Image (cartoon, rainbow, N blue to C red):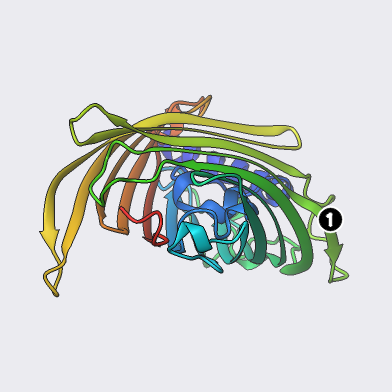
Amino acid sequence: MMKWWLKYCFSIIAAVGVSFSIYGQDAQFSQQMASPLWINPAMSGADGFLRGALNYRTQWNAVSDPFTTVAGSFDIALNQRPNPRKRKKGNPGLGVLFLADRAGSPTTRRTKIMLSGAYHVNLNENSSLGAGINAGYETLALDAGSGKWGSQYNGTQYDPSIAHGENLQSVQQTSMDVGGGVVFVYRRKANTRYDIKRSEVTIGLAGYQLGRVMLSEQNLFAANDDIRFSGFANAAFGVGNSGSALEPAVYFHRQGASQMLLAGASYRHVFSSGTSLIRESKTISMALGAFYRFGDAAIARLSFRWEGLEIGLSYDINTSRLSKYSSGQGAMEVSLSYRLAAPSYRR
């Protein structure tokens, strides 16, 4: 009985938090590197020639209705040329991002579609500096009928057939907003497609919710989103002649009174070469990573890469004060991405 009430109270607290503060804090991923347009619009066309990514995240299954987030993105670099002598001084990039977030009970749903554009100036053969902007449409809705209330407790368990007696109306709010960012990319040209001794460094700064225009009369929450400031740095460094690479990364987001710092590293090893259906040799690698989101969770990540296709799995072990209610269970996240490198970068 006590355990049931603890879960019930946590669900109510989560619902209240969602209802009054989710509009002040964007969704976040543990596999930030697998959702590039969510962390910086200037990443459009910055990493290779063509890239697509999907993320799925579910959390708080142990104590409440699951919070789920699904995101997908696609970006492409234009005017890429295989011959460095014919390469232009820069190239534009285009991207699109979709995100759907479902949180708590009563259910709060957020749907966002963002279009982005960027331009990257080639500083030299190995590095570039880019700037980008995005603009998008967002819908935020509260489904009041999906809630669970104390008045529906029959003395033994929750009974949905009991009228809750709450006077709540399902509401929906729509808006448009814009963001912008800059990104620096350094990538040492690989000698061969199997060259693991490459050096790659990407550093970016961005701002989201820089300008918001309300499109509906309904105001679901008391205030608009605060500006989300984002910064990140990730890299890949070959380790000797072992056919391995170390991939450190750090991500920081601040939005209003909330902030998130995620840091860690993955160790990648090319353990064999496979063959495609047309008998073209392909590179296969595996990476193991450990990350920590300060004050919240320890994260373990495993990924497999077959040439440009990569599948990532991660699990969050909750370390915050909520761990006594969640039994340490945090979030499960799955990512799927595909990157087609530009001819001059292909490895």
In terms of depth relative to the viewer, which is nearer, 269 or 250? 269
For residue 58, above or below residue 88: above
20 horizontally vs 222: left or right: left
Q: Position of residue 282 (x, y in %)?
A: 19, 59
Q: Would residue 13 be seen by someone viewing this image from the given angle?
A: yes
Q: Quadrant of the N terminus?
A: top left
140 horizontally vs 148: left or right: right
Q: Position of residue 227 (x, y in %)?
A: 77, 45
Residue 165 picture quarter = bottom right
In terms of depth relative to the viewer, which is nearer, 328 or 344? 344
Q: Would residue 291 be seen by someone viewing this image from the given angle?
A: no
Q: Position of residue 341 (x, y in %)?
A: 39, 59
Packing grade of label 1 (10 A; few <14, some 14-19, many >=20) is: few
Number of labels in the image equals 1
In terms of depth relative to the viewer, which is nearer, 300 or 274? 274
Q: Residue at x 32, y 48 (%)?
A: 313
Farthest-out residue, bottom: 278
Q: Residue at x 62, y 58 (%)?
A: 90
135 horizontally vs 75: left or right: right
129 horizontally vs 49: left or right: right
Q: Position of residue 246 (x, y in %)?
A: 33, 31
Residue 329 picture quarter = top left
Q: Residue at x 84, y 55 (%)?
A: 211
Farthest-out residue, front: 85
Residue 172 picture quarter = bottom right
Q: Secondary structure at mark 1?
A: strand
Instruction: Say which residue label 1 marks.
Output: 211
The amino acid on which the numbered mark 1 sits, given as a three-letter code, is Gly
Q: Residue at x 22, y 44 (%)?
A: 286
